[in-house]
Image (spheres, rainbow, N blue to C red):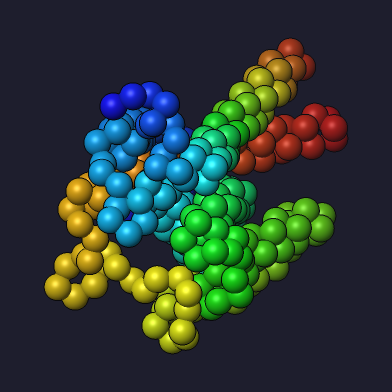
Amino acid sequence: MNVMTYLEMGGYAAYVWPAYGISLLGIVGMVFWTLHAFRQVSRKLAILEEEMKGDGS
Amino acid sequence: MNIFELANPKRFMRFSAALLPWFWTIAVLCLGAGLYIGLFRVPPDYQQGQTVKIMFIHVPAAWVGMMAYASMAVASLFGLVNRHPLADAAAKAAAPLGAVFTALALITGSLWGKPMWGAYWVWDARLTSFLILFFLYLGYMALWSAIEDETRAARACAILALVGAVNLPIIKYSVDWWNTLHQGESIFVKGGPLIAPVFLWPLFLMAFGYTFLFLALWMVRIRTEILARRARTLQLRMGTA
């Protein structure tokens, strides 16, 4: 099968590809934002724990 | 293992750290295989043509959107009854994920509705109850951020989550109770699915992939919440020292 015919999706390209595009965007967005938040909090906690040790408390 | 043993944040951190790589791996493998089969190995449907490909991302998103709400409601119940902060953290962590999956189901559904029904949106019982699910998530998140005191916010949100849970069976049975444009249940029916096996395989793979993706993200978000609380406690202690 030819690539162009495949991409046309039997005339439904305007519905199929946006649906896949938005799903990809949503999923990549969730993964990125979830991992980013985790890293940020871990870093903050590491700094705080370091400071606690520095205080000798 | 007893579920209450996991309610210890330290134990949860260890347990989730061990499970997470597996969850990510299963999610990636299932989504990869599902996408490959769904996009390249499945013939066009005899009625719906190539729009049947939207099913592979629409149905799993809808299932997980509801599953996330059910998880949130169960966690909320444990939070209310057992007064355990980890349950509150779990409920809070599920909401934004559920909201995104629900939004994806609504958008992909609308992109499927236009070519098949002739409309992006109709106010039928299935679509409307699903839109309400999305609003419940938004309301839940707004309520969390509106109440300053963590314990009170958790309690108010838990009640909202539990009251809203009545919407889940309404969504599920909407296609039986009302005349909907949305098709009826075609997978979990007596006598087996009404969908040809060639479409079922990629659908189940994608559904598994979406489920494990949700579980992995949910765990990471609970871990984030635990660390954030620890950081806040340390900050308070340092402030008073």
Name which residue lies at 67% across and 25% down.
Answer: A40
The vertical placement of B40 against B205, above or below, is above
Could you tell me if residue B19 is visible in this image?
no
Residue at far left of view:
B191
Query: In the rendering, at what x and y percent does residue A30 appear?
Result: 57, 37
Quadrant (top left, top right, bottom left, bottom right) of the N terminus of chain A: top left
Query: In the rendering, at what x and y percent does residue B38 appear?
Result: 31, 40
Residue at far top of view:
A54
Q: Where, by quadrant of the figure, is residue B118 drawn? A: bottom right
Name which residue lies at 14% across and 73% down.
Answer: B191
Name which residue lies at 39% across and 83% down.
Answer: B176
User: Considering depth in this image, is B236 or B211 the residue closer to the camera?
Assistant: B211
Query: In the rendering, at what x and y percent does residue B12 appear?
Result: 44, 41
Is residue B167 found left or right of B60 in the rendered image?
Answer: right
Name which residue lies at 79% across and 37% down.
Answer: B236
Query: In the rendering, at what x and y percent does residue A51 appear?
Result: 74, 17
Could you tell me if residue B104 is visible in this image?
yes
Q: Where, by quadrant of the figure, is residue B157 drawn? A: bottom right
The vertical placement of B71 against A51, above or below, is below
Is residue B126 found left or right of B20 in the rendered image?
Answer: right
The vertical placement of B73 against B141, above or below, is below
Is residue B34 found left or right of B225 in the rendered image?
Answer: left
Quadrant (top left, top right, bottom left, bottom right) of the C terminus of chain A: top right
User: Considering depth in this image, is B228 or A23 the residue closer to the camera?
Assistant: A23
Residue at far right of view:
B240
